[in-house]
Amino acid sequence: MVKKVEIYSKSNCSYCVMAMNFFDSKGISYKVYSADNPDIFKEMLERNPSARSVPQIFIDDILIGGYTDLVEKFSE
């Protein structure tokens, strides 16, 4: 069971919106961090130094990756 979902997002990011819609459709709550904020962006890079895009999704403090990684994980 998923306990904590965190999404690092930017404004006008269609994959970020799709990730949020995915969790909404599953009834899973999540917290969104705006990577438009330089401090939040820095935090995202500290958690995942290889991040090159958004969304960056963490479930229970484990990096899932982006939207396509999320869909693949839930289709297992």
Image: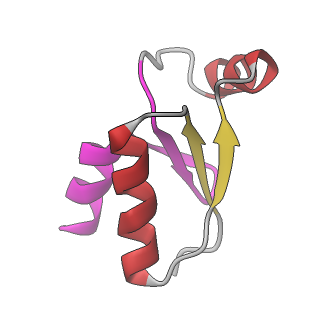
Q: Nearer the viewer, residue 12 or 65?
A: 12
> Which image quarter holds the C terminus?
bottom left
Q: Nearer the viewer, residue 46 or 25?
A: 25
Q: Is 65 colored magenta in this rendering?
A: yes
Q: Position of residue 74 (x, y in %)?
A: 28, 67
Q: Position of residue 62 (x, y in %)?
A: 55, 48
Q: Is 41 colored magenta in this rendering?
A: no
Q: Residue at x 37, y 79 (%)?
A: 25
Q: Position of residue 31 (x, y in %)?
A: 67, 58
- In the picture as drawn, the residue positioned furthest to the front comes out as 12
Q: Residue at x 25, y 57 (%)?
A: 71
Image color mode: secondary structure
Q: Residue at x 54, y 33 (%)?
A: 11
Give left or right: position of 73 versus 66.
Answer: left
- Give the total of numbered labels: 0
User: Is residue 4 positioned above or below 65 on the image?
Assistant: below
Q: Residue at x 45, y 37 (%)?
A: 55
- Magenta residue span: 53-76
Q: Nearer the viewer, residue 29 or 4?
A: 29
User: Is residue 17 positioned above or below 47 on the image?
Assistant: below
